[in-house]
Amino acid sequence: MEIAAIRMLRARVDSMITRAVISRVNDALKTQRLQLQILADETVDDVEHMQPYGLSFVPPDGSEAIALAVSGARSHTVAICAQHPGDRPKGKAAKTGGLYTSGQWRLFIDADGIVHLGAESGAEFVALAQKVLDGFNAVKADLDGFKAKFDSHTHAGAFGGTGSAAALTTPPASAPVGTPLIVFPSPHTPASVAATKVKAT
């Protein structure tokens, strides 16, 4: 009797952790469910696929997973760590990695911490929406200030006021050819709205 109990216990322990092949995926439920081929003649249906919080992918048929039989009971099997052989981009350097699908990087972080969107190597740093808005508002404020000063400055003749119209239209005699009549310095440039750690194709 003791030998039979030991054998049963060993069988349950041996079956707690196994490799499995995914033959079907149901992604319509709160927790993704899988059909697993665990042994050559054993198929387990409706297996919960436990994925990390905030991250979800649908593995293609033929993917591999680790099947965990809770307490050694096949009826309480869950799956973790699904992967599809051959899909993972390989040969990368240490301290790099990211998110991939179908053999291509969709988000890649290089050894310098630069995030590349859409490919392993992004072409340009992306513009950040808030920085674009902040930069636009800063330039608009500069223009509004310049307009207010311009509107309050008066000239004689067609321009009204008591000043000289020539003062508005004629640059100083010492100014080089091509010097603009109005110089509007601003510290805000398009480059200032770009991210310094995120590139995109």
Image (spheres, helix red, strand yellow):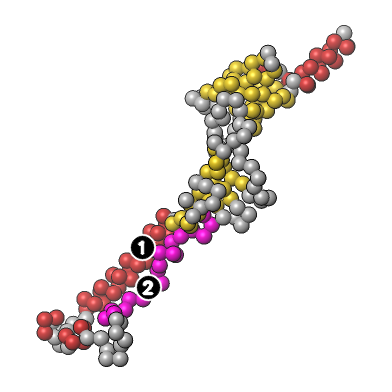
| SS of the residue under disc 1 | helix
| SS of the residue under disc 2 | loop
Q: Distance between the residues labelled 1 and 2?
A: 12 Å
- Give the quarter of the image for residue 151: bottom left
Which residues fall within the magenta stretch? Answer: 180-198
Furthest toward the right, the residue is: 2
Rendered position, 179 above or below 79: below
Q: Can residue 33 be seen in this view?
A: no
Q: Which mark is residue 186?
A: 2
Label 2 Cα crowd, 10 Å radius (few <14 / some 14-19 / many 20+): few
Residue 64: % across, % down = 64, 28
Rendered residue at 78%/21% (across/down): 14
Q: In this view, does 173 lie to the left or right of 54?
A: left
Furthest toward the top, the residue is: 1
Q: Does the magenta stretch include residue 185?
A: yes
Q: In this view, does 196 lie to the left or right of 77?
A: left
- The amino acid on which the numbered mark 2 sits, given as a three-letter code, is Ser
Camera-side residue: 47 or 196? 196
Residue 199: % across, % down = 50, 54
Q: Which of marks 1 and 2 is nearer the N terminus?
A: 1
Residue 88: % across, % down = 61, 38
- The amino acid on which the numbered mark 1 sits, given as a three-letter code, is Phe
Label 1 Cα crowd, 10 Å radius (few <14 / some 14-19 / many 20+): some
Rendered position, 145 above or below 117: below
Q: Which mark is residue 136?
A: 1
Camera-side residue: 107 or 150? 107
Rendered residue at 29%/81% (across/down): 178
Rendered position, 111 above or below 28: below
Rendered residue at 62%/20% (across/down): 36
Residue 111: % across, % down = 63, 54
